[in-house]
Amino acid sequence: HAIVMAQPDTFFRMTANIYLGGSYLYLNRPKEALHQALEARNLAKSMGANYEYAVTLEYEASAYNLMGLFKQAYAAQKRYSTFYRDTLINAQRSEQIEAL
């Protein structure tokens, strides 16, 4: 993974934030989950870590939903869906084509 080699400390911090965010969601602590997701999202975006960025968008939507902030949850879910469709699926298709 080129991202790990280029910026190991940032990558590990981002990964820790993602795991903490997921754990806080599991524990029904959405405010803490949102904080971790936003921290990880900023790191993922700066590193070009697309899969991790998508995970943070999904966690953000879940946290807002658990807080009852449904407009923000909808907007975050829409950002996640759009990013996933436009970026991750296109990358997967490109890899499949290259493998042929």
Image (cartoon, grey):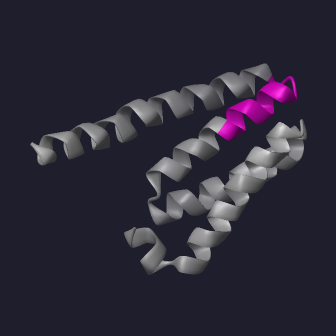
Q: Which region is colored magenta?
A: 59-69
Say left or right for 42 vs 16.
left
Q: Can you give x and y, in whole percent of width and height, for residue 49 in the image?
A: 47, 58
Give percent across and percent down for residue 79. Answer: 54, 32
Residue 9, placed above or below residue 30: below
Give residue 80's quadrant in the image.
top right
Query: What is the quadrant of the C terminus in the image?
Result: top left
**In which quadrant will I find the N terminus?**
bottom left
Total numbered labels:
0
Toward which corner of the image does residue 90 lie, by quadrant?
A: top left
Q: Position of residue 30 (x, y in %)?
A: 86, 39
The residue depicted at 44 percent of the width and 35 percent of the height is 84
Question: Residue 40, relative to residue 11: is it above or below?
Answer: above
**In percent of the image, x 74 and y 45: which residue is there?**
22
Q: Does residue 88 appear to the left or right of 22 in the view shown?
A: left
**Viewer-proximal residue, 27 or 76?**
27
Residue 12, placed above or below residue 41: below
- Residue 28 is situated, as x and y percent measured from the top left of the image, at 89, 35
**Residue 61 on the magenta span:** yes
Along the horizontal axis of the image, is 75 left or right of 96?
Answer: right
Queried whether the magenta region covers residue 65, the answer comes back as: yes
Residue at 44% from the left image edge and 60% from the top image edge: 48
Determine the residue positioned at 43% across, 79% down.
6
Q: Main secondary structure of the magenta part?
A: helix
Q: Residue furthest left?
A: 100
